[in-house]
Image (cartoon, rainbow, N blue to C red):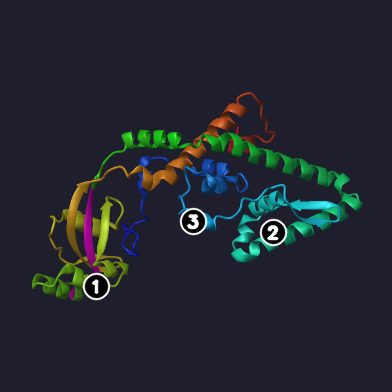
Amino acid sequence: MGSGRGDPIAQPRRDLVMSFKIAAPAVEFLRAALLPAVLAVSLAATPALAQAPEAPAASEAPAALDPATVIATVGASEITEGDLVLAAEELAAELQSVPADQRRAFLLTVLIDMKLMAGAAREDGLAESADFQKRLAYLEDQALRREFFNQIVETRVTDEAIEAAYDELAAEYVAEPEVRARHILVESEEEASRIRAEIEDGKSFEDAAAEYGTDGTRATGGDLGYFSSGMMVPEFEEAAFALEVGALSQPVQSQFGWHLIKLEDRRMSAAPPLEQVRQQVAQQVLYESYEAAIDEIRADIEISIEDADLAAAVEAQGGI
C-alpha cells in the first residue's frame, strides 16, 4: 500500500520527491550515471548526501592510512595503500561478495596478480602494440573524466546548493487532498460482511484487522498511512475518498479481494521536509551540475557524427 507495508492494492507509488518534479529524464540521467562508478560512489561519499554515522569512541578510531605507505613489493614494483584505494574503487561490485575481513587481502592479491601480468606483458612487448595504445588512451580519458567529475562537478553539491534547490522545489509544490485509512482485506464478500457486523457490535477495527486481515497491514491494525489520488487501485480509492472521517465502508471489491475501509483522517498534502528528501534533491543538484559542466565545455567544441541517424539519436539524448 502507499505506506510501503506490503499491501497488494497499492498502485506503484509516486515517491514524494517525484511530486517535486526533480526527476531527470531517464536517458539523460543514465548518461550522467554511467561515469564509471563515480556517480554512485560520490553520492555515497559526499558529506551533504551521506547519512552521518555515529562517531566511534576516540579509542576505537582507526589510524589514518598514508596513501604512500608501501604494503608489498613485486620485484621492483611497489604496491601502496593508495593503490589499494584505487583497486577498491574499481572493484566495488566484486567486493560486495567478499567478507569484510577478507577484502584487504583480496585487493592485494588482485594487485599482485596485476603487477605480475603487467610485467610479463611489458617483457613481451605488448605495451607497444596498437591495440594496447588505443586501450591506454581510452583508460586515460576515462580516468580524466572521473577526476574532472570529482574535482569540478561533485564539489558544487554543497549544503547551500541543496537547500536552495529544495526551497525552489518547495515553493512550486502543489498541495493535493490526501486521506489516511485502515483496511481489512479478505477473500469473500460474505466474510467482509460478517467482520463488519462484528465491528458494528463493538469490536475495534484494529483488532479485526489483526485477526482477519490477509495482507501485511494486519500487523499495524490495517493502517495504510496517508495516500492521495492515483496511489491506490481505483475501486479502493473511490470508496476511501467517499467516506467521512471515522466512517466504516460497506464491503468493497477489488482485483485483490474484498475490503472493509475505515477513514481515519483527511488533510492537504505538504511538501516533504528537506531531511526526508535530502538525498534525492542532492542527486538532482549533482545531475544539474554535471549537465551544466558538459554544456559549458561543449559550447566551444565542434562535434560531428558521420551517420545521420546515429547523430539524431545522440542529439535526442543530449549528447551533442
Nearer the viewer's eye, disc 1 or disc 3? 3
Q: Residues within 10 Å of mark 1 (few under 14, many from 20)?
A: some
- Of residues 145 and 72, the one drawn nearer to the viewer in this rendering: 72
Horizontal side of 142 relative to 124 (left or right) equals left
Nearer the viewer's eye, disc 2 or disc 3? 3
Name the residue at the top extreme.
300
What amino acid type is highlighted by mark number 1? Ala
Q: Residues within 10 Å of mark 2 (few under 14, many from 20)?
A: some
- Is 14 inside the magenta-drawn segment? no
The image quadrant of residue 262 is bottom left
Q: Which residues fall within the magenta stretch?
A: 178-190
What amino acid type is highlighted by mark number 2? Leu
The image quadrant of residue 88 is bottom right
Residue 276 visible to the viewer: yes
Measured as percent of width and height from the top left, residue 86 is found at 68, 50
- Of residues 230 and 183, the one drawn nearer to the viewer in this rendering: 183
Q: Dot 3: what SS?
A: loop
Which residue is at a point 88% across and 45% down the rendered structure image? 128
What residue is shown with label 2? 107
CB of mark 1 within 8 Å of CB of mark 3? no
Horizontal side of 237 relative to 5 (left or right) equals left
What residue is shown with label 1? 210
Measured as percent of width and height from the top left, residue 251 is found at 18, 67
Q: Gap in Å between the C-alphas at discs 2 and 3?
A: 28 Å
Q: Residues within 10 Å of mark 3 (few under 14, many from 20)?
A: few
What residue is shown with label 3? 57
Name the residue at the left extreme.
201
